[in-house]
Amino acid sequence: MTNKTLAILNQTAPFSHSSAKDSLDIALIMGSYEQTTCLYFHGDGVWQLVDDTQPEILGIKNFLKTFEAFAFYDIEQIYVCQQSLVQRGLKAVKSLPGITLLNEAEFAASLKQHHFILNF
């Protein structure tokens, strides 16, 4: 039986609504079932990768600490659209193993290789 791959495409800022948290929860759930899961960050989704966020100021729990659990759940493939970073003036993202910066064409081609894509 062939292992079907899942891509989770994150396109929303982390604290604007629950989509970002929901996507990370699903990634961890799928990882716990040993489902091959890759994370993609595009558009405003790249804001999830900024290190110095302070959601506590807004009275929101910092769910972005979830990234630290990725290795435990075998989530080792994280793709980031480089143009999205540039457009938002971001020069650096979280230091996580498995992060790959891709240009728009590479990003789209990589995303198309998966059997299922969940868009958040």
Image (spheres, rainbow, N blue to C red):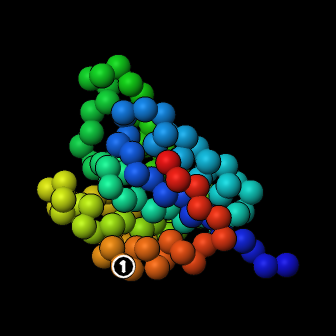
Density class for disc 1 (Cα within 10 Å; few <14, some 14-19, many ≥20) is few
Q: Quadrant of residue 79?
A: bottom left
Q: Residue 57: x and y, percent?
A: 26, 23
Rendered residue at 32%/61% (across/down):
95
Would you place residue 60 above or below residue 68 in this image?
above
Rendered residue at 32%/30% (across/down):
55
Q: Residue 70: x and y, percent?
A: 53, 57
Residue bearing mark 1: 105
Residue that lies at the very extreme toward the left in this rendered image:
89
- Can residue 104 be seen in the rendering of this structure? yes
Going by the image, does 19 lie left or right of 33? left
Would you place residue 60 above or below residue 37 in this image?
above
Residue that lies at the very extreme toward the right in this rendered image:
1
Going by the image, does 88 lie left or right of 105? left
Secondary structure of the residue carrying tag 1 is: helix
The quarter of the image holding the N terminus is bottom right
Q: Residue 50: x and y, percent?
A: 28, 50
- Can residue 71 be seen in the rendering of this structure? no
Going by the image, does 22 lie left or right of 2? left
Q: Quadrant of residue 85?
A: bottom left
Would you place residue 41 above or below residue 115 in this image?
above
The amino acid at mark 1 is Ala
Going by the image, does 9 lie left or right of 115? left
Q: How many marks?
A: 1
